[in-house]
Image: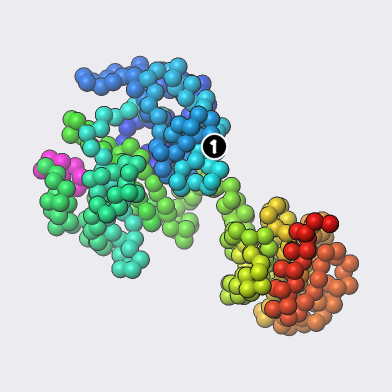
Amino acid sequence: MFFWAYFCQFDIPVPDGFVVGSPEEAREVVSKISALPVGIGDDSLHRESLAQILAGGRGKGKYESDGKGGVRIMNSPIEAFENASRMIGYYLTTNQTPPNGLLVKKLYIYKAVDVAQEFYVALTFDRARYMPVLLISDVGGVDIESNADKLQQYWFDMTHGITREIISYIQAQLGFADPEIAVISHILHQMVKLFREKDATLLELNPLVRTPEGNFVCLDAKFTFDNSARFRQPEIFSLEERLPEEEDQYEASQLGLSYVRLDGDIGNIVNGAGLAMATNDLVGLHGGKCANFLDVGGGATEQTLSKAFEILNRDSRIKGILINIYGGIVRCDMIAESIVAAAASTGGFRVPVVVRLQGTNCEKGLKLIESSGLGNVTVEPDFELAAEKIVELVELAGKPT
């Protein structure tokens, strides 16, 4: 929960907590928290545990181990150990995860906070208005998605931030007392500062709670950051975690490839985003369904093609590959040499492959591939016929022999 550290740095109130990676650590942490001095009215035994996954909706999610959610109250070190044993190392499914859920490797444990009311507060960008917007509601927590109609929206600019006028509107509409709106105003100004300095595109506090004593504490949050600001935020992006299905996209991006995972079974390797979209459309027109959008760009090389083949070869969904290259900036014979070399370096093709080359030296390139001895490869210079051919080969491969 790295955002906890940033919230402390920017003076946004959060409870003290600990990240644990095993049931033993969970037991030790709860023992440690229980030993801390507590104030009158505090429950020194209740501790809250949050499953750490790259998805929201954890409170209403379900674990494969016991069917319970990803946010739990634990009353003792023993309960902490027992709950962590059914949480760490198991998959949690929420309305924001893939159907099979996400594997939980860590928990965040903190002393539970008595809650009088939950609020939702978020900063993001309104693309239609080209400016940031503050979203706030007095109905926060796990039910925020079903209460989206209760969100109040306040547009602002980064130069002036959250103005006194906006603060006055918030107080009037949500009914904060004067001492409370002073705290809310401070939190909002600090959020804008954090939002700006860290190049965030979303900063969501849910819930921001008011305690019976009138204090405000953020119990959970979500960040997203501008990918174009990687060079300005190396510390943040060094902490990046990726979903399993995002690993291929990340590996491809390291070599300048554009990879997007789709739902079909025909893999594509193309050069140029427009050609990639046209290829996906034409494959669909002939009854096929593409498994990806993979653009190797105008400077396709043996290295980039090898990485493209590697990504597609390990994707068990793929039953055929269409290589569709237009030789404008690069020569088709150079592309053909790279295809042959990359195929050899990755052990050849395990599925049918159709190669379509068009442009500079395309005939020379196609002859080079035909004479290369590569198995499972068909050359077809016509775009539509190439798309039709790969669909046909995939359908044949799927029929029982």
In the displayed structure image, the side of residue 340 where residue 135 appears, left or right? left
Does 99 appear above or below 254? above
User: Residue 280 location, x and y as percent?
Assistant: 62, 70
Rendered image quadrant of residue 297: bottom right
Q: Secondary structure at mark 1?
A: strand
Q: Residue furthest front?
A: 400
Q: Nearer the viewer, residue 366 or 144?
A: 144
Q: Nearer the viewer, residue 121 or 66?
A: 66
Residue 36 drawn at (x, y percent): 33, 19
Above or below: residue 153 compared with residue 76: below
Residue extending farthest to the left is: 178
Report which residue position mark 1 lands on.
91
Residue type at mark 1: give it: Tyr
The image quadrant of residue 401 is bottom right
Picture coordinates of residue 192 (x, y %)? 29, 53
User: Which portion, as a residue range, is magenta?
Assistant: 178-187
Q: Could you classify mark 1 by the number of other residues whose Cα lies within 10 Å: few (under 14), some (14-19), or many (20 or more)?
A: many
Tell me the quadrant of the picture where the N terminus can be found: top left
User: Where's residue 334, x and y in %?
Assistant: 77, 74
Which residue is painted at 46% across and 47% down in the image?
Answer: 96
Q: Is residue 181 magenta?
A: yes
Residue at 41% over, 38% down: 60
Q: Is residue 379 left or right of residue 89?
A: right
* Residue 122 in view in this figure: yes
Q: Indicate left or right for 241 with 60 as reference.
A: right
Residue 10 visible within the image: no
Tell me what residue is drawn at x 68 percent, y 63 percent: 266
Would you say residue 18 sits in the magenta stretch? no
Could you tell me what secondary structure mostly forms the magenta stretch?
Answer: helix
Instruction: Identify which residue is drawn at 73% across, 56% down.
Output: 313
Give the total of numbered labels.
1
Quadrant position of residue 12: top left
